Image (cartoon, grey):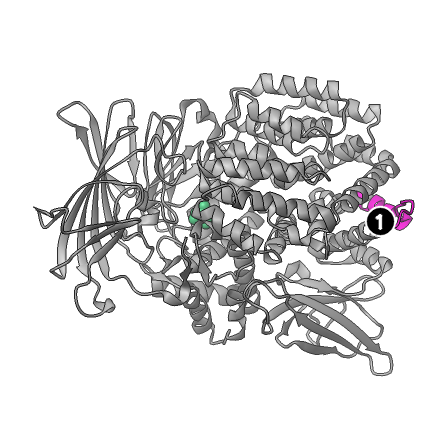
Amino acid sequence: PSTVYLKDYRVPEYLVDSTRLHFELQPKATLVKSQLKIRRNPAAGEGLPPLVLDGVELELLSVSIDGKLVPASRYQELPQGLSIPVDAPEFELEIHNRINPEDNTSLEGLYLSNGMYCTQCEAEGFRKITYYPDRPDVMSRFTTTIVAPRQYPVLLSNGNETARGTTEDGRQFVTWEDPFAKPSYLFALVAGDLQQVEDSYTTASGREVKLQIFTEAKNIGKCDHAMRSLKKAMRWDEEVYGREYDLDIFMVVAVDHFNMGAMENKGLNIFNSACVLASPETATDSTFQRIESIVGHEYFHNWSGNRVTCRDWFQLSLKEGFTVFRDAEFSADMNSRAVKRIEDVSMLRTTQFAEDGGPMAHPVRPDSYMEISNFYTLTVYEKGAEVVRMIHTLLGAEGFRKGSDLYFERHDGCAVTCEDFIKAMEDANGVGLTQFRRWYSQAGTPVLDVTDAYDEATGNYALTVKQSCPPTPGQEQKLPFHIPLALGLLGAEGTDLPLDSAGNTQVVLQVTEQEQTFNFTGLQEKPLPSLLRDFSAPVKVRYGYTTEQLLFLMRNDSDAFNRWDASQRLAFMALEQLQSDYRQGKSLYLPEALVAAYRSVLQNRDLDPALIAEMLALPSEQTLAEQSEQIDAEAIIVARKFARGALAKALKDDLLVCYRGLHSDKPYSPDAAEIAARSLKNTCLTYLCVTEDTDALELAQQQFHRASNMTDSAAALGALVNFAEAADTEAALAQFYQRWRQDTQVVELWFGLQSTSARWGTLEKVRELMQHPAFEQKNPNKVRAVIGGFANRNFTQFHRADGSGFEFVAEQVIALDKLNPQIAARLVIPITRWKKYRGELGEKMQGALQAVMDSGKLSADLYEVVSKSLA
Ligand code: DPP
Ligand code: ZN
């Protein structure tokens, strides 16, 4: 595969003013006719070069220009497209081709999912439907006609329905017209035997929009939450960004086979069933929240992505980073802001930091790629969102809104760059963000080393910040970043000290140099700094906090995020010590101070229960691995298991009291307060079961049998699967499966609970799960639940010392690559970071990765990840 570079970007040679598509659907032989009004792009230069179209795995039937058939000798079929000579600056091109949706297991282009036709075109899937300039800066007005047999009563595409009827041979057809010009990646088509729920929304300016969610009949009762979320999102975007919806209809379709979470096709969002369908009996609180945020995310793309799109795929974060920031703020407004922030940062630190420190590290705006699908990453999405958040922090809410207004106004209907986004922010606010731009071009996680000094005589407190950023592939040296460092200073009483004459207790320091000292004057005592409040930048902060200072912050910090962060730092210090003691063969013990701190958190009645639950959670093994210089998997597993066990034992009585206090028989509601209560209750239950005491496991059994909602039921089952005797686990799993076997989403959860269990998800069990009748290798959700769960979320079993976990993943990756390259390239990631492992385990991992490389011809997707990771 070849590498594409940002620096090679050229404007398109030809533009497409209109696109008329005609589909005659058949499982193995769908006929596609496309009529394109093509025009030489005046910005591209002189002359009439050949028209080069993208096309992959297409059967070409005919090419006509201005109604005349072009003989095959005139055009050239390329390995990935078609080259047609051109002799006029404007012409109409008509192409007929055939495709095979049934055998399309890559889930890109047009494919079948449980007998329903659907499409996925981002990033480069449209070229698997027909020949086209398949790039986001070619925007065209689409008209789509779908012809299908009667078994497919619902025929959908983008825009508004403009015609329907029956063909002479008794098939039916529907025509859709999208009034907004769009790139091919936003095209969508759906055909199936679907049911729908319908609602409507009146926009701020009084227009009525029809809202529809389509799904298979059996899931029709699982659409309400998504519909409510959609209406909330529409309102929120009007209130916070002044953005209204622009078509008369907004449709969402649930699909079982889907590579990603969802897709923002204009007016016709297609969702992975797992990210849209929910009912209290079948979905957990976190699923409810995930649905709300993804429905929001895809809806928000209508402006940040569709009305204003990306010029090229290097700019992906232009729409994704911005839209993730938008959906995070939406979720924060709908739920507990602090908890949402903690969840996001926790995920970022564990997974994005690992990516940024690994072989695939890349800037938020990458410079090159082999396969763009590999760049739908945590860096582009989550770090990209942090970059947008920093702009928000630097400009303030009002300044940011001025910037986004200008951005949408300037670029509506255009395909633009990250540079255009920053420029709009600058121009609207009259500020310069020159140095800030490095966040888009430099990879790696910056580190801030903070030291301080207090001068009693003058009352001056000096905070010195040194920044650095480790080398990443292709970037040995980094220039200093512009980092907003939000902080407060705590006095001995635990309150925030005023930092200026106006009495502000929080400042955002502008860290721009390699080393900088900030002075605070007029302080009566040496303060304790609360650094990087609310995680104001995606960096690591090192400051020599003592245990006492962290305990103090845990109790007193006015910034909820930093209270949590102090608990994490404290736990991390203890876990580091345990790892080191283990390596030296010392006996392990947990400091009394830590136990006391956890106890007081647990007993605190003023804190949000969800925050307490977050504070009680020890950093995951994956987080500990990311924070290690060199990963010692065994020491991490032993240390964490020990700490968890010791805490559970010491806190048992408090956990029981807390658990009982939170147990309620109220009917389920996915609102913030109820979710918080369940979260803490189930955290307590899990800790209690860690003891493996009979009374604790009895509680889990009771909860499992009595639960009226999936959150409680799954939490109890999870506790059993991790801590109960094999026979009891077996029985609970079987009972659960019997009850829910018809429900795809619950079965996925059932798979996941087993594959991620340190006890139950052994390699042998995971292989058994793959033989289960409900497992389906061609369904990404099932693969993610079973194989992905084992590789990404079962640290203990995946890291078995004999390396068999790695070999298993390698074997699955090789098999999956033949069916679905995108999924294979994701699944291989857990075995790519071998350089970070101590000793033999690293070698075993490298061996497994090499086996993938040596297994034969790899897809471009997989080849890129594997070759870069072996280098
Ligand atoms: N699944 C992707 C997203 O919405 C496609 N753009 O982020
Ligand atoms: Zn997105």
180 lies above or below 408: above
Locate residue 120, reporting x and y percent: 37, 41
Q: Residue at x 48, y 62 (%)?
A: 365
In this rendering, position of residue 592 left or right of residue 609? right
Among the 4 quarters of the image, the one containing residue 379: bottom right
Q: Nearer the viewer, residue 753 or 57?
A: 57
- Where residue 480 sits in the image (x, y, percent)? 60, 73
**Residue 608 versus residue 697 in the image, above or below:** below
Which residue occupies the extreme bottom position in the image? 458
Q: Nearer the viewer, residue 160 or 25?
A: 25
**Quarter-wise, where is residue 673 in the image?**
top right
* Residue 235 in view: no
- Name the residue nearer the viewer: 508 or 747: 747
Residue under label 1, please give it: 583
Question: Which quadrant would the C terminus be assigned to in this image?
Answer: bottom right
Please name whichever residue, 150 or 11, is drawn nearer the observer in this view of the structure: 11
- Relative to 378, residue 482 above or below: below
Give the farthest residue toward the left.
68
Q: Which residue lies at the image location 65% right of the left edge and 48% below the top edge?
A: 339
The magenta segment: 584-602
Query: Can residue 356 be seen by looking at this rendering?
Result: yes
In the image, 754: left or right of 821?
Answer: right
Residue sitting at x 69%, y 19%: 730
| Tally of marks | 1
